[in-house]
Image: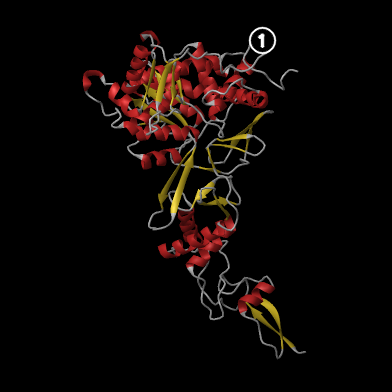
Amino acid sequence: MNQTTHTVNGTARPTVSGAVSAPAHETAHDTEAPPVNTGPASVNTPTPPVSKKRGPVNKPASTADDGGKKPSAAVRLVQLAKERYRFVMSADGRPYAVALDGPNIVLPFKGRSGLRQRLARLYAEVYEGDVASQSALADAMMVLEGIAEDDDPVPVHLRVGQDDLGTIVVDLGTADGRAVTVSAGGWHVVDRSPLLFRRSGAMAPMPAPLLEGDGLAMLHSMFNMDESAFRQLVAWLIAAWMPNIPHPVLTFKGEQGTGKSKSAQMVVNLVDPSPAAKRSAPRDLKAWSTQAFNSWALCLDNVSAIPGWLSDTLCKAVTGDGFVDRALYSDDDVVVVSFRRVLAMTTIDAGALAGDLAERLLMLDLQTIDPDRRRTEEELDTAFGAVRPAILGALFDLLASVLAVLPDVKLETMPRMADFARVLAAVDQVMEWNTLDDYLAASANVAGDALEGDLFGSALVALVDECGTWSGTAAMLLEHVQPPGGIRPQSWPKDATRAGGKVKRIAPLLRTVGITVDDTQRSQDRNRSRLIVLTRSPLPDGSASAPESAGEGAVRTGPPSP
């Protein structure tokens, strides 16, 4: 077979006589020669290049179809993205991109510093003088979202996550993607997180923890609280990095000038640093869901009254909440925001809190600051910044010890917020403290304060104090009890149905003052109406929910004794 030799872009190529030549771009690829029309001519080659435009460095090869048409901008955008990212779908149905060569941080498809913005910039850098249009970017995003949906959803965490083996991972929020891993064996700072994390504009970097000095003593020096309150605070901080349990709402209570707002700010910046650690109460459910979606820990500052919808929302955020809304520019698609959050509040009067929320509080009283011990905010910020790495090191050390003993901690009876109570018992075992009993006693006091602040609840207490035992329908109860002054406030039940629901809702608070509620009985007439029976009973034993012990103590570890 006859062969001749000719030059393509400066490279000698044999050609079989009588055969049909392959397209230029395929021939160039087979011999690893530079593709046609993608770069300057080879050195010392007299044949000029087909295109005189000099391409940028590392410019991807353009693949033309049989008609010589260049790939569209959308196709090139998809190719650029696939070369640099992998694509996942989160459990709540949101697509993300993860850099193949970078930290284990997901990028949203839209928004500031999202994948769309980065691809637009990358396209302009790679294809000099060319800018991707909005329609090309939209088409590319649609294709990449389809790629993300090919695999099963994966967990995407915010600040704190936990793997299948129980290891807790805390994202430091730094650009290099470092994280802290905490297990029963200790804690370590790792260069790359083993879990996927997302970031938000409400997050700030966390300093790397250090084991230096007595970190817990340094922490206590930042707060004006007694030993019992401080130990409960430490236990709450430990639980705040356990993402799979409910956390009581940490509430700083005290008169003006006790440093409530600054204390709450420092606590939130230990758990989940933010440029806006303190926030006002949200105006509606959607505003709240936006805040909660973008922060692991939040603080509502200077709470004097909480509307009913917000009280219910905070209760659900403690145990795990979800929010479903219609997707933008869509008739039948929805977006889901699901979260369990770590919450803090500052208030002066606990009586302003609804009963169900009061049961989910950890109330800590702050002491008055002596004038000669007051410090400016600048001084406090400087002091806090200096000791924060050592405080974090001490807290992560304690967290590792708690994780080691927690599986064997058993409680005799389960109080409200039972998972948090087990953490308190584990802290007590490690530190030889008594935080669980203090927490249970403080919870009873908070419930009593909340009951005093509820006019209808106070009227029921007065009724039982007068009668001893009262029985009747909800309509009879609403007619029998009267508000102070005869003027019904807005929170007073408006009808029998609401009155019955109100009694059931505040029943746990009534139990804390020795009043039991029974609504299982029916009247003996033909109407068979549901009866409400209010009875005075002995006050509950404050130690009833204490952990088991063979003698004095709070915790039994290991299997029960034979």
Task: Classify residue 33 by image quadrant.
Answer: bottom right
Q: Measuring from the top left, give residue 120's x and y in whole percent.
A: 46, 58
Residue at horizontal 55%, vertical 30%? Answer: 241
Residue at horizontal 68%, vertical 24%? Answer: 408
Q: Is residue 345 above or below residue 58?
A: above
Residue at horizontal 58%, vertical 56%? Answer: 84
Please state which of residues 433 and 320 is positioned toward the viewer in this rendering: 320
Q: Measuring from the top left, give residue 235's x and y in whole percent.
A: 55, 21
Q: Tag 1's secondary structure?
A: loop
The N terminus - image quarter: bottom right
Query: Callout 1 environment at 10 Å: few (<14), some (14 to 19), or many (20+)?
Result: few
**Which residue is under mark 1?**
551
| Residue 220 visible here | no
Q: Is residue 183 left or right of residue 562?
A: left
Residue at horizontal 35%, vertical 26%? Answer: 303
Identify the amino acid type marked 1. Answer: Gly
| Residue 400 visible here | yes
Q: Is residue 532 above or below residue 255?
A: below
Q: Is residue 388 left or right of residue 473?
A: right
